[in-house]
Image (spheres, grey):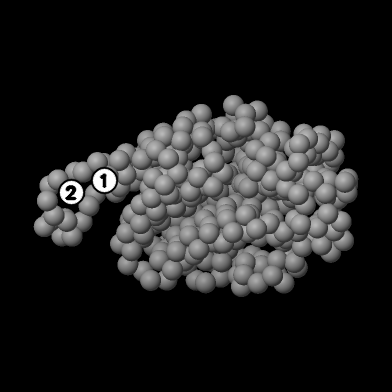
Amino acid sequence: MEIIKRASFISYSLNPFKRNLFKCTINYNKAIPQLEATTNNLELPDFIREKLDDLQSEIVLTLLTHDEKTIGSMSSNFKGNNFTRNLENMAKHYFNQGGKLFRPKVSLMMANALNQYTGNGELISLNQYRISIVSEMIHTASLVHDDVIDKSDTRRGTPTVNALWGNKMAVLVGDYILAKATQVLCSIGEPAVISTMAKIIEDLVQGEFMQINGNNNNSNPTKKDAELRFQHYMMKNFYKTGSLFAHSCKSVAMLAGCKESDQMNAFEYGRNLGLAFQLIDDLLDFSASSEALGKPTGSDLKQGLATGPVLYAAQQYPELNTLISRKFSQEGDVKRAWEIVMSSNGLEKTKQLAEKHCLTAVEIARKLPNNFQMSERLADIAINQINRRN
């Protein structure tokens, strides 16, 4: 497999960010004819679909399973007390809703494509399947914690854990899911893979810190300030969203026996897919209906967050910088910011940047073996981000 040009996150340093990823001056008029899906009407191969069908029940079973060696000497009253039952019920609350399983689907498809590439004879190994389980568990734990931080009462029309059981219990259940995910991860028995996946949790926390602290205090930013602000936004997007895709794809590549350069290609596929996913999410906060999105539109503005559409709009309408600097906290700020964004080219530029990252993911995917049309399926997953509605 041809080595794709490595981008910034190989070293996680700021300079490669500036060189390769987050330049605000991009030729947005460039046509991207490659972004055309080819496998939209095809079902997933049975061996992928069956694993996805089993995945949520496997996670629920993991949440209910206790180490009998540890608790064997404890009384039956402790084993079945209200605390443990409630913790398990709360943990199952999200997994029993039947989510889209987008992250495990990506890791399973990447695993199969790379197993073809290395010729190791497996469709998907047990340890690669475990990576998909861990990725979904980490993602769900992050949702539980995010709902507490964002004070969300519903998610996709369903009451959140914190709405039903309170913030303190929600924090505990998020921690519980992470602890169980760590147990599954350790069962893989590959220290390098375990370390790679553990980086996701570190990045999630780092991304949340970046989001809370922000980098938007200047009401009259220079062009350089605006560039740094956008870099901060994109770096946060990687930590909060792209890292999970990137490190999961790299981990299944490591388990496939890929050489380092191909591990990094898998990483870059996941990173670019994740960044495109988040950019489209931020766009949909302005353009989708609340029903389709599963949360109120404009929620980012209400939380004081300046996402891609807002930052691009501020380049066109500098008055928006004052609202950004005070996190849309004054009466009328959210409404005015919304109006400015909708009258600007912010949504268009955000979509075009997402297309740029999608194209990079597509280029990587199309260099993979295409048995079971896996290469094209991975390319189409990236392409389909552009026009998704929720």
Is the residue 251 above or below the residue 176 in the image? Answer: below
**Amino acid, disc 1:** Thr
Whole-percent x and y of residue 223? Answer: 87, 60
Pick the front one: 303 or 250: 303
Query: Can see residue 216?
Result: yes
Q: Quadrant of residue 300?
A: top right
Q: Residue 102: which numbered mark, if any? A: none
Q: Is residue 188 left or right of residue 80?
A: right
The quarter of the rendered structure image containing the N terminus is: bottom right
Whole-percent x and y of residue 148? Answer: 50, 45
Q: Are marks 2 and 1 in contact (CB under 8 Å)?
A: yes
Q: Which residue is mark 1?
A: 84
Query: Can see residue 137?
Result: no
**Amino acid, disc 2:** Phe
Q: Quadrant of residue 128?
A: bottom left
Pick the front one: 308 or 144: 144
As measured in the structure, the alpha-carbon distance from the residue carrying label 2 to the one carrying label 1 is: 8 Å
Q: Residues within 10 Å of mark 1 (few under 14, many from 20)?
A: few
